[in-house]
Amino acid sequence: MEFPYNGSVAERITFGNAEIHLASREVFVRGDKAKLPWRTFDVLRLLAQAHGEVVPKEEILRQVWGGEFVNDSNLTQAIAQIRKALDPPPDGKSYVETVPRIGYRLSASTKVPAPEAIRHSHVVIASHIPPVARRASAFRRFRMAVLIALAAILLNSGFALYWTRVQDRPAEVSTMGHSIAVLPLENLSGDPEQEYFSAGITASLTLNLAKIRALRVVSPYSALPYTNARKTPAEIGRELGVDYVLRGTVERHGDHARLTAQLIAAAAGRQVWAESYERDLQAIPALQGEMSHVIAREVRVQVTSEDRVRLSRVRPVNRNAYEAYLKGRYYQAKRTDDGLKKSITYFQEAVSRDPGYGQAYAGLADSHTYMANHGFLPPRDAAPQARVMAAKALEIDDTLAEGHTSLAYIRMVYDWDWPGAEREFRRSIELDPGYAKAHSLFACYFALQRRFDEAIGEVRRALELDPLSIYDNTNLGWHLHAARRYGAAIDQFRKTLDMDPGSAQTHYGLGRALEQQESYAEAIAEFQKAISLAGGTPTNLAGLAHAYARSGNARDARKVVELLQALSHRRYVPSYEMAIVCTALGNRTEAFAWLEKGYRERDGYLWLWLNVDPRFDSLRATPRFIALLDNMRLPH
């Protein structure tokens, strides 16, 4: 089906409290103008001109972006922006409906002029609507290695993989003229294997700039679509909501690297500063601090004494250790058994070459906790290693926010030392208020203390710092779920899936929330989707078994239990998950046996959910359950 983009159309289209003006490319909600980026408006117009028909994703990508993008993340971002800009209809559903695996359409609550009315409209504005640009993909030169390499650095430094809503934030957050987007630095080495290196430099430079509190820095993932794109600095600045754009190149040869940078005032399209640097690899971290000072001066932002201290906390690093560290973060981001084992190997290489490398010890602590969290190692094996590595990182540098966050996590997950965990979280945030990961994990701490409003507040702070994070958008759904706000949790999980339909954790979370609403068929479908995306992990299988049992299908629930038991012979299966299924099947004695086994093993899943998980509500008032919470020093 062909959707005519430039045919005759009515001047205005009404959406409940919203109205789009096609000729002026404006959207008004309750009379107030809503800002939509250029291409997001094109998506909205294309859906409107389809008159309620489903528009396939491929068709939208073809007409709006030229159809050559590596994935449809830009489209899901545009849909999220449209949904955010328009007031929700009276029934609470979105104006833009997702048709799974096909595309999108406007809901029946929209009032789109019928084709006959359009043909007889007194205003014909086709000549005023510019054709959609057919541009070459901005990502042709950026392979998947760049995404993974950026993920490796950013996921452990307060930024994340996916871009969601930055384009429509600018007006209210950029009033002081102190905002900047760092475009991914282009790799000129001629070696595609070096993409992780240029990505790592981009991430490190961004994080250094973010240490200046008066400067708002957009994540490289928000800027990634503009790499090599045929857009002016003014367009980039307007769409990302920033006053300055920093772009440049990295060229590495052996132990040396050449870095060029160009700072552009976005609105004027005027270069305000440019420089070229040549350094040994071991001097790159110090160079990034030097550049941050220069950029701050050029954008006329105040660098406080605290900012200077943070920027000065850079020590020379052995060049081979630095490279091993970047590779460690690269493999850590994969979160697979093999990837985490490789990350540990590279971090160990980094500290063996440079015993004073605190960040590499923090990386080791994180990898060991991930091994336990993902069921690749029993907690009793992983926790001691993680604790030692985090302590070593802080012994080397007590001002390392990453080290305090790692230690806080261990205090919380394995030691159940709640006052100690809170102290470490607060110290991390004091050292680096812009460290999104600290806010995200601190939210978990508050949830465990049943301080749900504070938990939701912390995860929202993480999203203010990094609105691009699928992880934290999913976490917001989890905290709403823990607070028993199931309807809000379902909405949040669905919004997150609009941003990334391939997030297995989000499908699992949606399944959990739907099950609490007794929408068992939908919940089971979500658990099955999570399994199809991430495999039969203990968590996914236990969720499915519990939903089967709650729906009255004990036979299939027991079949899944058999799969879990078989899986336990090949890998660690958390006792908590076995207790979940036994509870659903009415086997209370067996459920308590598993919970108490998990307590002895320091099962990390107990801290995560035990005192807030609604699946244990049938046990919650029993003396045995209360004793377990008391032993973990958890409120009830």
Image: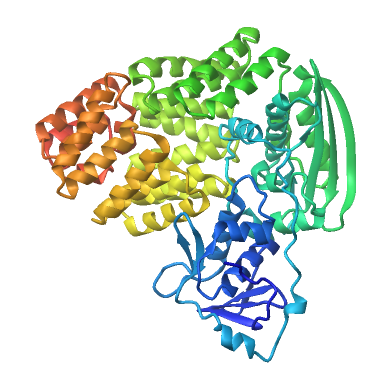
> Which quarter of the picture shows residue 238?
bottom right
Q: Give whichever of 610, 46 is nearer the camera.
A: 46
Q: Residue 619: horizontal and vertical position, in percent?
A: 15, 40
**Residue at 25% across / 29% down in the picture?**
564
Q: Give whichever of 142, 307 is nearer the camera.
A: 142
> Which quarter of the picture shows residue 189?
top right
Q: Residue 71: horizontal and vertical position, in percent?
A: 60, 47
- The residue lying furthest to the front in this view is 1
Question: Can residue 610 be seen?
Answer: no
Q: Residue 16: horizontal and vertical position, in percent?
A: 50, 79
- Is 167 placed left or right of 548 in the picture? right
> Which quarter of the picture shows residue 175?
bottom right
- Is 65 placed left or right of 402 in the picture? right
**Residue at 68% across / 29% down in the picture?**
200
* Scheme by which the image is coloured: rainbow
Q: Image height check: is 245 above or below 337?
A: below
**Residue at 61% across / 68% down in the picture?**
2
- The residue lying furthest to the top in this view is 352
Q: Image height check: is 439 above or below 342?
A: below
**Image quarter hosting the C terminus:** top left
- Is 448 placed left or right of 55 in the picture? left
Question: Can residue 341 be seen?
Answer: yes
- Is 79 placed left or right of 241 in the picture? left
**Image quarter hosting the N terminus:** bottom right
Q: Give whichever of 277, 214 is nearer the camera.
A: 277
